Image: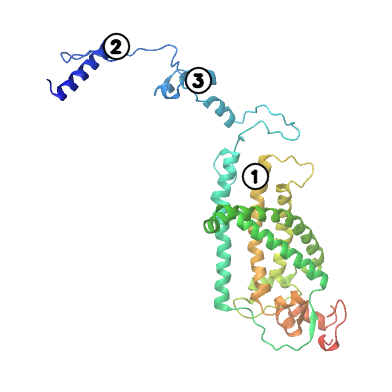
Amino acid sequence: MQHPSRQLSALLLSACAALAGSGVFAQTTPAAPVAATAPVTNAGAIKGANIFDVKPDANEAPGYATQTNAERAKVQPGNNAPMWRQVGAGVTGNSSLPKSQAPEAGNLIQPFVQYPGSRLTNAGEAWRQVRNDWLIPYGGAMLLIILGAIALFYTTKGPIQQHGVDTGKKIERFTAFERSAHWSNAIAFCILGISGIVMAFGKFFLLPVMGLTLFGWLTYALKNMHNFAGPVFAVSLVVIFVTFLRDNIPNRDDVIWLLKGGGLLSGKEVPSHRFNGGEKLVFWGGVFFLGIVVVSSGFVLDKLLPGLVYERGTMQVAHMIHAVATLLMMAMFIGHIYIGTIGMQGAYQGMRTGYVDETWAREHHEYWYNDIKAGKIPAQRTEPVPPSQTVQI
């Protein structure tokens, strides 16, 4: 009786012999090395439909770069490079949308362009480069630097104090209408600013904390608030401009105020009229110029301008302009908000109640106070108040 291991070896040898006889395995002998044979070429290239059958040297075929999809399918099945090359080049395909309403509906990928700060690439990628490489990092850094500078100034210098003692005599600085216009604009600006910051920068500091689901709901809600607050902000800007235009006409005293920095570093207040040079700079630079740019670009993004064809390129340019203008506006308004709240003693009280003490008016807006004392400007412009609370002219 044979040993079990010998029986197993015999069975394996029998199986190998059967496979060799059937042609599955080619019979080889170790006697002499087999001479190398020339590779067999196939004039029709690869005929299989399996993408794993592609030859590594398929790109060496004549005219490979200019092949059509049908020709390419014979060499590299599943490779639709010619079609996507045409798509990337901006070739227009077929679309059921009318040309008058959607002139680029047949183009999947926009043509090449170079926006400021981007490389020469298709417009969608160029816009992404401007947003991710410039607007987000440098815009966020600018806001953080301004906030840090204000915090440093407040901790080292503190708020601008009133040196004299209140007399109890009040001057009407803002009427009820002026305050309502200002607060409407301020509330709309806060909604727009907070929602814009969350949508632009929220994924860096909120998403890791609250998670994807909650952050998605938050950004969705803020986006809708942003869209509704935009028109309110636009209307209130117009009201603000018309209401305060008369007292914001620049003059020589404003140049002196700006050159001396308003006395913030020296600690000596620079005389000014009802609005100083810094407030007029915010009025003309922030409310007027940047206001026009922010509102007009925002209306394009909200598709509120009639007769305008809203192509992707139009929306991309509007977004970049809107982002730059809003970042600059926020930078200016952050300083204005600081001075109007915790940065100057008594400033917030004037906007909340409409009245300031005559000591405050004399110290911070000396020329305006002198005009009131001289009778050029009324100390009370709306309903009368008790004589003890008005400035005695």
Position of 235 with respect to 122 (left or right) is right
Q: Earlier in the sequence, mark 1 or mark 2?
A: 2
Alpha carbon distance from label 1 to label 3: 37 Å
Q: Could you tell me residue 146's position as x and y percent?
A: 58, 65
Q: Horizontal placement of 264 versus 63: left or right? A: right
Q: Secondary structure at mark 3?
A: helix
Q: Is residue 68 visible?
A: no
Q: Residues within 10 Å of mark 1 (few under 14, many from 20)?
A: some
According to the image, label 3 marks what residue? Answer: 73
Q: Amino acid at mark 3?
A: Ala
**Residue, x 13% and y 23% (percent of image)?**
3
Q: Name the N-terminal-most of marks 2 and 3.
A: 2
Q: How is the image coloured?
A: rainbow
Specify which label sits upstream in the sequence, 1 or 3.
Answer: 3
Q: Which residue is mark 1?
A: 316
Tell me which corner region of the image, top left, top right, bottom left or bottom right, holds residue 8: top left
SS under mark 2: loop
Q: Disc 2 to disc 3, how far (Cα)?
A: 32 Å
Q: In the image, is 385 to the left or to the right of 10?
A: right
Residue 205 is marked as none
* Identity of the residue drawn at 22% across and 15% down: 14
Front residue of 130 and 98: 98
Q: Quadrant of the C terminus?
A: bottom right
All told, the count of numbered labels is: 3
Please state which amino acid type lies under the numbered disc 1.
Answer: Gln
Instruction: Relative to 107, say whether 227 is above or below.
Output: below
Residue extending furthest toward the left:
1
Q: Are marks 1 and 2 in contact (CB under 8 Å)?
A: no
Q: Position of residue 286 (x, y in %)?
A: 70, 61
Between marks 2 and 3 in the image, the one whose residue lies nearer the viewer: 2
Disc 2 + disc 3, Cβ < 8 Å:
no
